[in-house]
Amino acid sequence: MFDANLDTLTYSLKKVGAHDVKIVVGEIGWPIDDHKHTNAKMAHKFYNRLLKKLASNQGTPLHPGYIEVYLFSLTNENRKSIASGNFDRHLGIFRYDGQPKYPLDFSGQLNEKMSVGAKHVKYMSHQWFALKDDVKNLKTMKGNMDYTCGLGDCTSLSNGPTCNKLSERKKLSYAFNMYFQMNEQSVEACHFNGAAKTTK
């Protein structure tokens, strides 16, 4: 697919007389969430094959030799716009906290090892915000769910990603907790009419 895309562009440019235009691949990556095929296993496979190809400097049939490529992106971006799709927040080779998701060899030699993660990351307390067990009518929680997902990051709950098979109760807890964490664990920001509580 990479060859086909690059060669389609190369051919089209030559067809209109733009023979000397330097082609740079500005963004290429594989997300780990948003679809059944967007997971760490597939991303790992994608990068291994891409990096091996780039290291060979063979290029493509219409673009032989070195290809300048920029991987997208270094880390996940939990505040990025999802206008083009939920996957945009899950393209990082590293998680939000700078820890690697899977082993890679950026030289393309397939001598895989985990990249060095960010050091001295200050983590918040190990506590979460979850729906209380005594909340029975989950329909009354729709407004809270919409609110937390609008200001937090619920992209892992949509159709296809890692958490889409959670029960409705667990989806609510996920949404409440994501909002809680993104607000630096502020209980004041997460009242939800007393429907949720902090838990260890």
Image: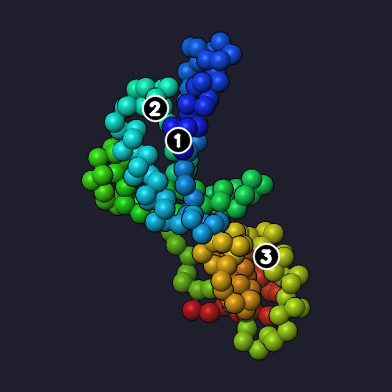
Q: Is residue 178 above or below residue 134?
A: above
- The residue shown at (59%, 13%) is 16
- The residue shown at (29%, 31%) is 56
Q: Is residue 151 above or below residue 3?
A: below
Select label 3 or label 2 by which is in front: 2
3D distance between C-alphas at marks 1 and 3: 38 Å
From this viewpoint, is residue 36 visible?
yes
Q: Is residue 12 above or below residue 143?
A: above
Circles 2 and 1: CB atoms closer than 8 Å: yes
Going by the image, does 92 lie left or right of 173? left
- The residue shown at (63%, 73%) is 172
Which residue does the numbered mark 3 point to in the structure image? 148
**Label 1's element?**
helix
3D distance between C-alphas at marks 2 and 1: 9 Å
Earlier residue among tags 2 and 1: 1
The residue closer to the viewer here, 69 or 124, is 69
